[in-house]
């Protein structure tokens, strides 16, 4: 299994631009999570999906952030418009039904200038 | 509210010496506790977990963790550290009411010197 796949690995953009981060979970996993990691705030859960349905988006910082999961093998996290304070590493993780363990992707390092 | 605390930002040990990375937790109900490791430019990797049973849990790469209910702690240990163990370590607790929600500690950077 290739594990959780995220793209791009690095993204540098200018303030005000739209940013789309992509994630492919492990095949057969039915839960998908988006996290943000910063030095100041550590690892924060932004949103998670169960069977492609968003269950808890209470961690999404504001309306500029949105996430979708159109099918079991693909999810996106979009920031529009982006701001310098959005600079962070964004992780996607997936988990199978009844499993305790989340499997993390390699992350996307986002820099907003 | 559920939470974990990692009181040390950084732990330094010499190769071959035992290591301990501390974690304390606060949870309503039975704790489900986890340790993850993050190597540079990589995602978090699962090390071990405590759900129930024996208080000493063994995991990957020779790591183990001791669950202590009275002290609400779940410290990560290894008898003999390797330079390759140098990484960022995260303790996490799962919400007992929501099996999909995890709360991570702030992380502890482990430096193992030759």
Image: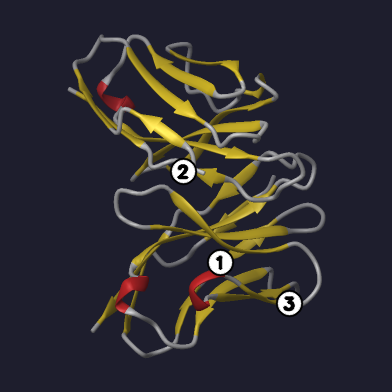
Q: Residue furthest front?
A: A1
Q: Which residue is mark 2?
A: A43
Q: Is residue B16 above or below residue B98?
A: below
Asked if residue A101 lies left or right of residue A63, the reply is right
| Residue B40, image x, y percentages | 30, 54
Q: Which residue is mark 3?
A: B55
Badge 2 and badge 1 in a common chain: no
Helix, strand or loop at label 1? It is loop
| Residue A108, image x, y percentages | 34, 33
Name the subunit of mark 3.
Answer: B
Q: Which residue does the image show at 49% across and 38% down from the upper left?
A: A44
Helix, strand or loop at label 3? It is loop
Q: Quadrant of the C terminus of chain A?
A: top left
Q: Is residue B97 above or below residue A113?
A: below
Count the marks.
3
Q: Which residue is mark 1?
A: B23
Which of the 4 image quarters holds residue A47? Answer: top right
Q: Which residue does the image show at 77% across and 44% down from the upper left?
A: A98
Neighbour tally class for label 2: few under 14, some 14-19, many 20 plus, Cα within 10 Å: many
| Residue B11, image x, y percentages | 36, 73
| Residue A40, image x, y percentages | 36, 43
Q: Earlier in the sequence, mark 3 or mark 1?
A: 1
Which of the 4 image quarters holds residue B49? Answer: bottom right
Q: CA distance from mark 3 to mark 1?
A: 14 Å
Neighbour tally class for label 3: few under 14, some 14-19, many 20 plus, Cα within 10 Å: some
């Amino acid at each position: 299994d290739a594990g959780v796949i995220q793209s791009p690995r690095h993204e540098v953009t200018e303030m005000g631009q739209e940013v789309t981060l992509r994630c492919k979970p492990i095949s057969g996993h039915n839960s998908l999570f988006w996290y943000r990691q910063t030095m100041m705030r550590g690892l924060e859960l932004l949103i998670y999906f169960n069977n492609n349905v968003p269950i808890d988006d209470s961690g999404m910082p504001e309306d500029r952030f949105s996430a979708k999961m159109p099918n079991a093998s693909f999810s996106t996290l979009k920031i529009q418009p982006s701001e310098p304070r959005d600079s962070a590493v964004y992780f996607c993780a997936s988990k199978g039904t009844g499993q305790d363990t989340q499997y993390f992707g390699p992350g996307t390092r986002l820099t907003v200038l | 509210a559920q939470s974990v605390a990692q009181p040390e930002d950084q732990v330094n040990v010499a190769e071959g010496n035992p290591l301990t990375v501390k974690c304390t937790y606060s949870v309503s109900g039975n704790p489900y506790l986890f340790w993850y490791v993050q190597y540079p430019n990589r995602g978090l990797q699962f090390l071990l977990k405590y759900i129930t049973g024996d208080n000493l849990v063994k995991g990957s790469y020779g790591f183990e963790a001791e669950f202590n209910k009275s002290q609400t702690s779940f410290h990560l240990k290894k008898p003999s550290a390797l330079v390759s163990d140098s990484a960022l370590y995260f303790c996490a607790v799962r919400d007992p009411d929501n099996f999909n929600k995890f709360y991570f500690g702030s992380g502890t950077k482990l430096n193992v010197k030759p």
